[in-house]
Amino acid sequence: MGTTPGFVCSHHHLYSALVRGMPAPPQTPTNFLEILEQVWWRVDTALDLEMLEWSAKLGALEALKSGTTAIVDHHESPNAIEGSLSVIADACAEVGVRVVCSYGVTDRHGPDGATAGLAENERFIKDGGRGMVGIHAAFTCEQATIDAAVGLAEDLDVGVHVHVAEGFTDAGSGAALARRSKENWLLVHGVHLPDGLSFAGMMAHNPRSNMNNSVGYADPKRFGGRVVLGTDGIGADMLDEFRLAFVKLREDNVTTTPQTPWNWLENGWMLVPEAEADEVTWNYPTMDPWHLAYTTGVHPIDITVEGEKVLDNGVTTKVDEAEVRAKAAEQAKRLFAKL
Ligand SMILES: [Zn+2]
């Protein structure tokens, strides 16, 4: 059977695991900003720490069952900020998945919300947590908040994890922030960044999310060798995202080979190098990109993380999958009742 290292989901929102099947919003969103307002910003204000715990366990479990052993998460829960990153990190550890946490700082909930978000990033990282300083996006932050987050990341010697130019709304402010980026930053989307804009760090491409939100095509080839693949909260099946990234490239240019999106997938090991030592055995004989680009239903059988077998013949060893799914379903009900 084929083997690979563990894959990295380079941009995720683990709290999305509970949101599938949520009640329809009061008004049907007609553009990206309305999707944020009608769906995500109603969801994130309703989250509490118990919901976060089970959403993270379910998200981590689904990642593992897709061969993804590391997640770079971007989190927001404005009414449950303090301690949130530890809840997510502990939940992932319980399942056996590596996680890099960040709290997305924003001024959408006033200056106190921004201060609490900064404090949560600082608390988590100073306590020894694996993290980056999160910023939601430049267009939802005051300049002073952005400056404070950038300064905090420098003080803590970690990168900034931020959405840039996902929609038109953030084109100008996102580009301005991207120009300030450093080598250890993780920028996300970059759909509306101008060609040739100079930035440092990595750019997370999330093809399924971009299509789902109708924000346009990021055309990540223009970012050179700095592209990584994320899901933006729609699961963590990186072979699936690779296949989607590939056909999107082919739609533009039929001479594209699967090596391009495969390189994006492998670039995830620049963000979480330890995952390259994880061992995944698959139910398919060859893990060649040309095969995988056209083969669905490829799943891991066994996974070893840090010397510990966390998936054994398709079964999670550290948590009971049925229990995680049942508890997460209860929390989803609680969440939907609050919307
Ligand atoms: Zn995102």
Image (tube, rainbow, N blue to C red):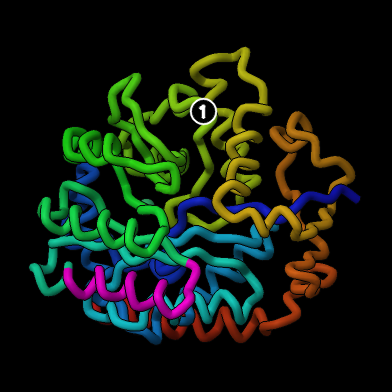
Give the answer, above or below, for where 196 lies relative to 98.
above
Segment colored magenta: 115-130
Q: Residue at x 58, y 82 (%)?
A: 324
> Quadrant location of residue 326?
bottom right
* Residue with the mark numbered 1: 248
Q: Main secondary structure of the magenta part?
A: helix
Packing grade of label 1 (10 A; few <14, some 14-19, many >=20) is some
User: In the displayed structure, does residue 160 sit left or right of residue 94?
Assistant: left
Q: How many marks?
A: 1
- On the rendered image, what quadrant is the C terminus found in? bottom left
Instruction: Tell me where residue 54 appears, x and y as whole percent.
Output: 48, 80
- Vertically, is 337 above or below 59? below
Q: Residue at x 33, y 43 (%)?
A: 213
Q: Nearer the viewer, residue 227 or 160?
A: 160
- In-image side of 140 versus 103 (left or right): left
- The vertical placement of 325 against 105, above or below, is below
- Give how far across and how far down residue 177 sits, in percent: 24, 41
